[in-house]
Image (spheres, rainbow, N blue to C red):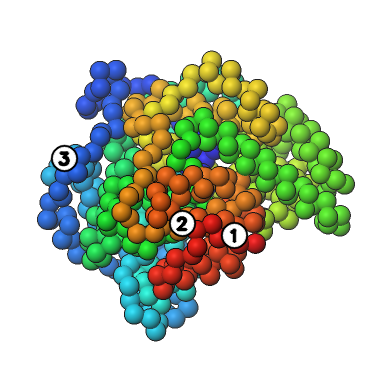
Amino acid sequence: MSRFLALRTASLLAASLLLAVGTTACSGDKDGTGLRTSPALAATALPTALTSQKPDWQPCPAPSIAQGGDGKAPGKLPDGTAWECATVQAPLDYARPDGDTIDLAMIRAKAVGGGKRIGSLVFNFGGPGASGVTTLPDYDAAQSLRSRYDLVSFDPRGVGNSAGVTCLSDKETDERRASTHDLTETAEENKRTAAACAKKSGKVLPHVGTESAARDLDLMRQVLGDAKLHYFGISYGTELGGVYAHLFPKKVGRTVLDAVVDPAEDLVQESLGQAKGFQLALDNYLADCAKTPGTCPYRSPEDGHRRIAELLVKTGEQPLPTTSGRELTQEEAVNGIAQMLYSDELWPSLSISLSDAEQGSGDNLLTMADVLSGRDDQGHYSTMQAANTAINCADTKRRPTPQEVAASLPEFRKASPVFGEPAAKGLLSCTGWPVTGKSDTPQVSAPGADPIVVIGNAGDPATPVEGARKMAEELGKGVGVLLTVKGEGHGTYGVNPCATKAVNEHLLHGKVPSDGTVCS
């Protein structure tokens, strides 16, 4: 699946969205297989010219199409503070820090209020592929943290205005999303897409992995003038935070990881876990829906499961029309449903969208699938999906074949009648990618680091709560501090009052919650 501020794997529901992968040899270093390799990065000192940069903060322009902008510059904060933007240079290849550089796009809102300033609080909102420059101004929950922090976010390398990865044209992406393929056809289509990625972005593809992004975080820490990195990671941003802690344990400041990726699961395990997670969220939605018969289109959860299955069969045989002239395919219908399972606040919209689809209109579900894929209402795509694939495939070594995926289908269908098969098909996203991946799972152990608050939500569809437990365990004793929430949706800060209070106490006052705290 593509991950809108959400998913770590390049898997679930993905074949039509992830602009995925293929086999094309590119110029550059080889590993003997004809594929470029994501480099192993030594701890090489950075040039002073990079670590001593002084960002030239200026009023932010309107975000670019690559960032997913709507053509409007971010408005001022309620107290009149303007958002400021700047770029920082980082090595393209951290193994060659004196070589070529790329620009990292950054945004900040300066601290204001009565508290003594602690430093900068850097946010990563997930994906991978989400633009922090466009997301931070809309993250209202963070505003209370400005009493002691400059709020800072950035476009990670490969994303938006930070050497954003591009692959297909807007038209080509629309055409790919509108088509349906079996496993072998999907793999062949991925090869053609990968060739486009290599042609347009081949120089950066070996250097967009999470380890390089973690080293960017430490460069930003130094440029921002902080002795330690104060960090808030959401979804994939939790993996990035864990990798940072592993690489720089003594530089870990006040850190929160919310909606946590399981660092112990490989590509297949995580994809299967996400299929189960979205199925659980769908089950919970239908159980809640049945309690409100005046607005729910279904008589019971069982009725809902049956009719959703029938709807998906129908769209598989004949895509639904929309007023735009585009059609809603089965895969896009599943993507639209998934997008509205990220938060229980979207459940009423899901009821309306499913009802409309049963009556023959695919408009609402396609609109939500567009959100998931980074398409705006003018038909332009951000770099989100291309970056998602590039980062995932730089990280993971797994390259399943169509035959291996076919063998896994029964297990995935058992995990989820709705999301299982698309999740399995998404396992092909890195098959044949022109850069070999780094490892099966990330290293996040961080002995000696300051406590890191790790939050999991029982009803999270994208990052099941087990991932938070495993992250806390792998960070190490005395480092990972687990807080679990009995709630729905992807992420808890600003949604669950108990978790929000615990986060604020930690970030603003240095108070670490008791390990194992449970919020209702």
Q: Dot 3 corresponds to which residue?
A: 96
Answer whether residue 314 is visible to the viewer in this image: yes
Q: CA distance from mark 3 to mark 2?
A: 36 Å
Front residue of this view, candidates 126 and 269: 269
Which class describes the residues within 10 Å of circle 2: few (<14), some (14-19), or many (20+)? many
Mark linked to residue 63: none
Q: Amino acid at mark 1?
A: Val
Which class describes the residues within 10 Å of circle 1: few (<14), some (14-19), or many (20+)? some
Front residue of this view, candidates 262 and 77: 262
The earlier-in-sequence mark between 1 and 3 is 3
In the rendered image, the vertical position of residue 78 relative to residue 235, given as above or below = below
Find numbered disc 2 in the image and state the secondary structure of the residue it sits on: strand
Answer whether residue 67 is visible to the viewer in this image: no
Find numbered disc 1 in the image and state the secondary structure of the residue it sits on: strand
Q: Quadrant of the C terminus?
A: bottom right
The earlier-in-sequence mark between 3 and 2 is 3
Q: Position of residue 106 (x, y in %)?
A: 33, 59
